[in-house]
Each structure stands twice: as C-alpha cells, then as structure tokens.
Image (spheres, rainbow, N blue to C red):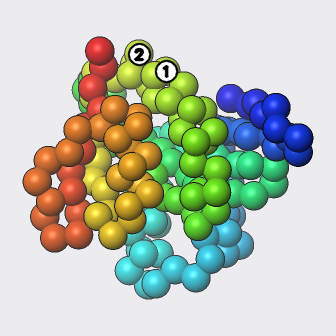
Amino acid sequence: VACTDSSPHPQLTLIESVSRRRMQSLISSGEWGKLSEDQLKRLQDSIDATTHFWIGMVDKDLICAFGIAEPSFLTDRAYFWVWPTEKLQKHVFVFTRRSQIVVKDLLMRFETLFGHCDTTEPGSKRWLKWLGAKFGEADGAMIPFEIRRG
C-alpha cells in the first residue's frame, strides 16, 4: 500500500510486505536504534515465529515493522505484533490509515488478530486502538489485545 500525501512537501508513505531475510537485515543494521538485550530478544522471538512481515516507511525512513504468526493452517486466529521506531510519532496519522487497510485485508482471512502490547509504549497501544483492538487485563508491562472481524 503506497500513497503520496498532498502536503506542500509530499512524502511517500509505504507499507510493504518483506521477507524474513529483509527483517533480519533491518535488525542487524540498527534501524531501531539502540535496543536493550531484552528488547532485541523479544523482537527476534517475534520474527522467528512470524509467517508474514510488513514494514512501514515514510520516504526512506523505517517507521515500524509488524507481522503475523499463524499458530496452524487450520485456525482462524493469528498472532499480531508491531515494533515501532521513534520516528513513528511524527507520522502516526497517515501511517495508521495505511495500517487499517492491511488489517482489514488480514481480517478477511482471519476472524481474530491477537497479541500483547507493551504498556510502556503508549504509541503502540494508541495505534492498536485505532486498528480496532480491545484490551484485556495487563500482566505486568504487557496487556493482551484482540482485533476481531466485523
């Protein structure tokens, strides 16, 4: 999904499906900035379990990555994760609109997208709300969510 906005200085906003190799390359290149050992492990665990990846870009800046993990081919649920960069805050509105299109397409295939949101990342929770997420009870720094079809 690509779009150029109509502002005086238009920016190309892109959500692109990418390969596992491309995701690994983005991690090793330091595109997320300085990650703690725990954050790097959580990001790597998400990537290891993921079957489909997307990245969000504005011009040539990585804004975030997200993906889904299908527990099995027989389920109508998929685990949904997002990993933002600090640059997401500057482009949250236009990026959210593009993300809604991708999520709408995913909900045509899956009845439910579910996952966990880090409560210390308020931008992630806000983004998930805009995508239609409903949240459960927090367990420490993590809060479960679901995005349902219909």
Spot occupied by residue 94 in the image (x, y as percentages of width and height): 63, 39
In this picture, residue 31 sits left or right of residue 60: left
The image shows a total of numbered marks equal to 2
For the view shown, which residue lies furthest in the front direction?
8
Task: Tell me the quadrant of the picture where the N terminus can be found.
Answer: top right
Spot occupied by residue 26 in the image (x, y as percentages of width and height): 67, 64
Spot occupied by residue 79 in the image (x, y as percentages of width and height): 32, 42
Q: Which residue is mark 1?
A: 105
Residue 101 visible in image: yes
In this picture, residue 121 sits left or right of residue 114: right
Secondary element type, mark 1:
helix
The circle drawn on residue 108 is 2
From the viewer's perspective, is residue 8 above or below residue 24? above
Q: Disc 2 to disc 1, how far (Cα)?
A: 5 Å
* Front residue of 110 and 123: 123
Task: Tell me the quadrant of the picture where the C terminus can be found.
Answer: top left
Secondary element type, mark 2:
helix
Q: Residue at x 54, y 25 (%)?
A: 101
Q: Residue at x 62, y 77 (%)?
A: 33
Q: Amino acid at mark 2?
A: Met
Residue 72 visible in image: no
Whether tag 2 and tag 1 are in contact, CB under 8 A, the answer is yes
Q: Amino acid at mark 1?
A: Asp
Q: Residue at x 39, y 65 (%)?
A: 121
